[in-house]
Amino acid sequence: MNVLVIGDIVGSPGRDAVKRYVSVLRDQYEIDACIANGENIAAGFGLTAATCEELFESGVDFLTGGNHTFDKRDFKAFLERSDRVIRPANYPPGTPGAGAGTMRVGDVTLGIINVMGRTFMPPVDDPFRALEAEITAMRAVTPCILVDVHAEATSEKQGLARFADGKVSAIYGTHTHVQTADEEILPGGTAYITDLGMTGPSDGIIGMESEAVLSRFLTGFSDRFSVCKSGTKQLCAAVLCLDTRSGRAISIKRIFQRGIP
């Protein structure tokens, strides 16, 4: 099974990049399923029902979240009824939505788990224990399991990867908006990359207009950040090839497509 996993999609430029290029990747790599991090799809902060549906129509099958999942307050109702969008599993009990989900890929069930780091991030429950609980439940259903770790610290992502090695098919990082070049297959057969990177505007600073970000650095104050609308776009992702019987990863290929109009 070939799975395309896409890094943080930022605003309308990111959605446009997906619309223009995901179909190309699906054909090129014979993709069976496409999973994307969607926490920035609505003007850079959060998700809406409309932006989720736009991505589903563009070739994305399933969306994960992060610290911006609940930025749009009216998204709660859609999250609670959708079986194609999840939020980090280590949000406290009672938080709307689910931290894991499944989708059918032919005659195979693919499991997707989402956790969020705690280092330099908003306070949440322990991602290690939350991940362990979700893996235990998911392995009763399928050996093919993907994990999106939405976290800032490389060490925390690597720690979660080593913790889950041999128990999941792949564990990949999101959140920093900068792709890393450390893709590998861990000893237990789990594919890993510290961060998939950002899908969105190539100009600006991690997808945002430069002026406001620079003002924050230089003066400690700025207007609210807004998505950069100028220049070309990029799509950052990885293609995972999974053995559907064992759940082990066969390969991981990093994708960084620049210059999307």
Image (cartoon, rainbow, N blue to C red):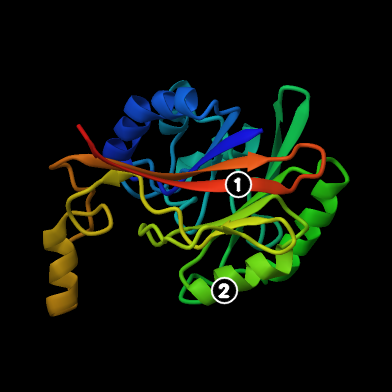
Q: Is residue 6 left or right of residue 207?
A: right
Q: Say which residue label 2 marks.
A: 156
**Element carrying mark 1:** strand
Q: Residue at x 36, y 50 (%)?
A: 198
Q: Which of the labelled discs sits on residue 198, or is there none?
A: none
Quadrant the C terminus occupies: top left
Nearer to me, 167 or 65: 167
Residue 56: in sight, yes or no?
Answer: no
Q: Is residue 100 left or right of residue 257?
A: right
Q: Say which residue label 1 marks.
A: 251
* Sooner in the amino-acid sequence: mark 2 or mark 1: 2
Give residue 84's position: percent from left, percent from top.
61, 33
Q: Is residue 234 left or right of residue 34?
A: left
Give residue 117's position: percent from left, percent from top.
56, 68
Give residue 122's position: percent from left, percent from top.
49, 70
Quadrant the N terminus occupies: top right
> Mark 1 Cα within 10 Å, few/some/many (few <14, many 20+)?
some
Q: Is residue 20 left or right of residue 2?
A: left
Q: Amino acid at mark 1?
A: Ser
- In space, the residues marked 2 and 1 are separated at their CA atoms by 23 Å
Q: Is residue 39 above or below residue 67?
A: above
